[in-house]
Amino acid sequence: MKGLILVGGYGTRLRPLTLTVPKPLVEFANRPMILHQIEALANAGVTDIVLAVNYRPEVMVETLQKYEAEYGVSITFSVETEPLGTAGPLKLAEDVLKKDNSPFFVLNSDVICDYPFKELADFHKAHGGKGTIVATKVDEPSKYGVIVHDIAKPNLIDRFVEKPVEFVGNRINAGLYILNPEVIDLIEMKPTSIEKETFPILVEQKSLYSFDLEGFWMDVGQPKDFLSGTVLYLNSVAKKHPEKLAKGDNIVGNAMIDPSAKISPSAKIGPDVTIGPNVTIGDGVRIERSVVLANSTILDHSLIKSTIVGWHSKVGRWCRLEGVTVLGDDVEVKDEIYINGGKVLPHKSISANVPQEAIIM
Ligand code: GDD
Ligand code: MG
């Protein structure tokens, strides 16, 4: 089987992290985001994976070569000279996606869930339509593509409304599809939106179905949702693979800690925390609902709450970081500093408080 991951863009909404690391390589739960997807595709029997990108960062090529060997898949980069939207990349990768008659998967790269690829493929084959969209329910549907059904036929899509201004329903497009190769014939080689241009044609043809996702789902393309997604993911790991979570007297609730991290026994970690490799956490530190990325240091008695600490950063003593603060790569926060909702660009040193949401550059 085949799959295409829409990797496009520069991940602006996940800045400052994406200023130094391409979005798909930013670690979610201590593994590059894209690895969660590659692993799920490989487990479902996918052998050819296309990464649809607007640019080709060398670091990504290197990392992915490693995964090719590890997961026994072939990964090719399909590079757009201008952003082709969410449908154009399918046309550009036509050679791979049409190499046989079997349907192919399409994934938005910023979506985290228990990817149901096998079940999706079975469901798709059974209904005989040209496409199937994975659906999930959310409280705030206006940020997403909404799926509307005929009551009589609960899986055949009657209407697809991208980013609705008025409420039409709360079952949304989870950003995972399976499509027959002939769908590519509906797409021209130019910037095209699959949600606004291709899906409406399939709906018109009565050939687009939806498949309900079980369990958690989150688009982790922005810091606030990255943290919420981490909470949901850890919750799911706690149920399915509790052995992957940290245990100990100083751990509260769900926390995932790389074995190479050095954590003072008097620090208190959790709930809902991930700590990456080679991180050092000092005495009396308190961390909750946060992500600490590789090679960072948090010195004694600091409080880290609803925060993403970027790689190689150093937080001083008696600091307080909260309110969806994000530190980029190699940031230094001096002792006793308070940051509330600051986005700090890479290589900065912070020696004054940031009491309100601000970008520090
Ligand atoms: N290759 C390529 N080229 N990829 C692109 C381009 C492009 O020009 N534009 C966007 N993408 C990729 C993004 O990187 C992302 O993985 C995916 O396409 C969707 O784009 P987003 O910008 O993240 O869209 P969204 O989150 O606002 O909405 C989409 O996702 C929702 C679920 O999270 C839509 O598909 C909605 O219908 C859906 O509900
Ligand atoms: Mg998105």
Image: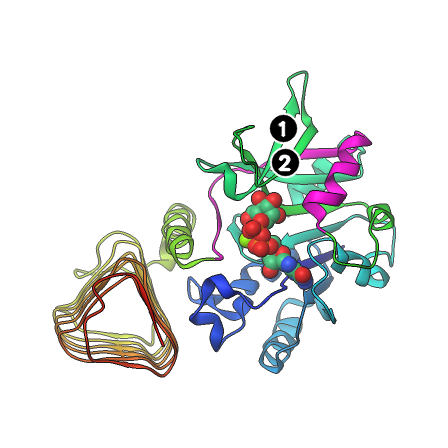
Question: Which quadrant contains ligand 1?
Answer: bottom right
At label 2, the amino acid type is Val
Q: Quadrant of residue 48?
A: bottom right
The answer to whether residue 150 is left or right of residue 333 is: right
Residue 211 shown in magenta:
yes
Circle 2/circle 1 CB separation < 8 Å: yes
Could you tell me which secondary element the residue under label 1 belongs to?
A: strand
Q: Which residue is mark 1?
A: 148
**Does residue 40 appear in this view?**
no
Q: Which residues are magenta?
A: 193-221
Q: Position of residue 200 (x, y in %)?
A: 74, 37
The mark nearer the N terminus, 2 or 1, is 1
Q: Quadrant of residue 272?
A: bottom left
The answer to whether residue 320 is left or right of residue 292 is: left
Q: Which residue is mark 2?
A: 161
Is residue 303 positioned above or below 310 on the image?
Answer: above
Is residue 165 positioned above or below 231 on the image?
Answer: above
Which colouring convention does the figure follow? rainbow
Q: Position of residue 286 (x, y in %)?
A: 17, 63
Residues packed near mark 1 inside 10 Å, few (<14), some (14 to 19) or many (20 plus): many
